[in-house]
Image: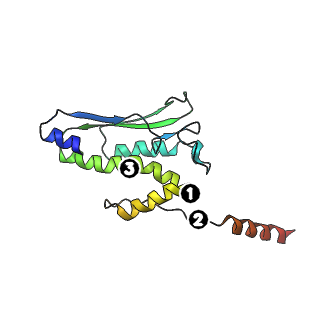
Amino acid sequence: LKFNEMVRNGEVGPIMLGRDHHDPGGTDSPFRETANIKDGSNVTADMATHCFAGNAARGMSMVSLHNGGGTGIGKAINGGYGMVLDGSRRTDQIIRSSVLWDVMGGVARRNWARNANAMDVAMAYNRDNDNGDQITIPYLTDDTKISESLDRLFNDRS
């Protein structure tokens, strides 16, 4: 927002802000960025695609969906963006909406995979943000109770 304000005030000319890919939400690669996601979704390409589509819907000047990203062709899906900072109030709103979407998508994914740190961040985000976004928090289960229930269910059948 500060850079866009500087453009608006005539301190600098228009600026292109962008990123090619990053690990929170814009990249799916079980070999690197999503290797620490242990719920099995680390091999899917859905979050990079959601990140790409969300950035497009929120008004980024340029969006991209590509593969590779340093891991080799076919081993990663990456969603990137570019945003021309032109000093307009409309651009302020796009920045507020898109940058949070872009980063918090990765936090949400790790939260859904039951990463304790990501769950803490997601709960704090839900509590503290005032933009209307909310991240769904997973219901945690007791693995012992599930195992005992399954044992009872299947042992009663034998």
| Mark 1 element type | loop
Residue at mark 3 to residue at mark 1: CA–CA distance = 20 Å
Residue 133 vertical position relative to residue 11 in the rendered view, above or below: below
Quarter of the image with the C terminus is bottom right
| Residue at image coords 44%, 50% | 105
* x, y percent for residue 31: 59, 36
- Looking at the rendered structure, the kind of residue marked 3 is Trp
User: Do labels 3 and 2 touch, CB within 8 Å?
Assistant: no
Disc 2: CA contacts within 10 A as few (<14), some (14-19) or many (>=20):
few
**Which image quadrant is residue 157 in?**
bottom right
Q: Which residue is mark 3?
A: 101
The percent position of residue 40, horizontal first and vertical second, equals 62, 48
Amino acid type shown at disc 2: Leu
Mark in the foreground, 3 or 1:
1
**Residue 137 screen position, x and y as percent:** 49, 62
In the picture, measured across the screen, residue 100 lies left or right of residue 140, that is left
Q: How many marks?
A: 3
Distance in Å between CA atoms under marks 2 and 1: 8 Å
Question: Which circle marks residue 148 in the picture?
Answer: none
Using the image, determine if residue 62 lies above or below residue 73.
below
Q: Earlier in the sequence, mark 3 or mark 2?
A: 3
Q: Which residue is mark 1?
A: 114
For residue 140, the mark is: 2
Residues at circles 2 and 1 in contact by the CB criterion of under 8 Å: yes
Q: Earlier in the sequence, mark 2 or mark 1?
A: 1
At 36% from the left edge and 37% from the top edge, which residue is drawn? 81
Residue 67 sits above or below residue 90 on the image = above
Q: Callout 3: few (<14), some (14-19), or many (20+) C-alpha neighbours within 10 Å?
A: many
